[in-house]
Amino acid sequence: MNRTAAELNDEAADMVARFRSVFIHYPPHVSLHGRLDYLQKIGRRTRGEPQMGLRVLAPSGSGKSTAAKAYVDLVETRRPRTPEYVPVIKVDLERHTTSKKLMVLILEAFRDPYASYGNELTLKRRVLSCFERFGTELLIVDEVQHLNYRNGLRNDVTDTLKGMLDTGLIPIAFLGTDEALPMFRRNLQLNGRLLPPCDLHPLKARSGRDQKLFAGYVTRLDQVLVDEGIFGQQSGLNEPEILAALFDVSKGVVGRVNRLMHAAIEVAVRRGAARLEIADLSWAVDAWAVEQSFIDHNPFRKRRHG
């Protein structure tokens, strides 16, 4: 029986959503969780003293934001968020974030219905009050590359974040792309408040260790497709030629493999497949990776026709 376009959309959307909901075990991301846990715990033991921060830089698509969200979920699983208790707050900076806008973002994360009401000083006092009232132990600030400016309002935001560390109320994890690196290198006052960096670097094709990390990630990803009921059988994504093609497309950034799968899963589900095939992966590379300029060729074509 032929399914309607709406029915196919429903099924494809459901399967991609299932896949996106799973945190795939990847040692560098697990290590990041460990460093966030340490930062949170050292903050708990030194409350009232100037707090520490943590730098986490990585190329776009490395999965740092996903890993940070998974950490928040993990913390809230162990100690659930309640109307009176918010253990961790995560905010995403925007390109034109001012100090006032930063306060609004934090208050919104606390679900304050009046987050945008008041001047900057009033909002800052409310933010600090929220950290104390809700027992918050960690602030995660994502997209900090938007603060990489030598002059102007963005420096005010950096100074505001440094000032938060000095209040003794909250440690801060700074997440962003490599574009933020110059900001950290020239801001020695901020660097002096940071733990050793936990940057996530792209995997190297010639490194045996990195090859194993990549293969392990893809193997677990393949298993997730079965465990979540997306496909009935494994897709053999860890076959050497497929791994090589996926590494070529992703350039060693595992989050890009994850994003590629969104497109591949959709097309495979629409055709009623029991597993991902090379044709699905090849289509996804053309439709997503090439069109989005992550790569200028399709390594799966060579495999299919070589």
Image (tube, rainbow, N blue to C red):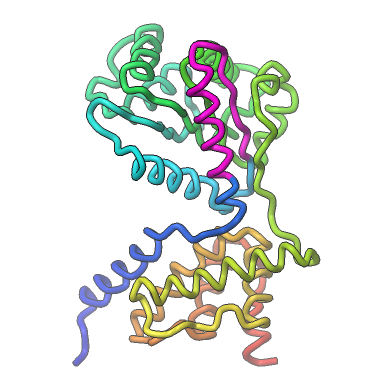
Quadrant (top left/top right/bottom left/bottom right) for the N terminus:
bottom left
Identity of the residue furthest to the top in this view: 121
Q: Residue at x 65, y 48 (%)?
A: 200
Q: Position of residue 117 (x, y in %)?
A: 28, 15
Q: Can you say whether 205 is above or below 109 in the image?
A: below
Quadrant containing the C terminus in the rendered view: bottom right
Outermost residue, right side: 206
Q: Is residue 114 above or below residue 77?
A: above
Q: Position of residue 11 (x, y in %)?
A: 27, 74
Position above or below: 179 against 70:
above
At x 56% / y 18%, what residue is drawn? 51
Give the vertical position of 50 relative to 144 (above or below).
above
Image-based side of 162 in relation to 14, left or right: right
Residue 109 sits in quarter: top left
Which is nearer the eye, 55 or 294? 55
Observer able to see residue 274: yes
Badge count: 0
**Is residue 72 shown in magenta?**
no
- Seen at 53% across and 78% down, the residue is 281
Residue 73 percent location from the top left of the image: 38, 45
Q: Quadrant of residue 108?
A: top left
Residue at 65% x, 17% y: name it: 151
Q: Nearer the viewer, residue 282 or 50?
A: 50
Along the viewing direction, whichever of 55 and 281 lies nearer the viewer:
55
In this rendering, position of residue 229 left or right of residue 295: left
Q: Which residues are magenta?
A: 32-56
Does any portion of residue 153 appear in the rendered image? no
Q: Residue 9 at x, y = what percent?
A: 27, 72
Q: Residue furthest front?
A: 45
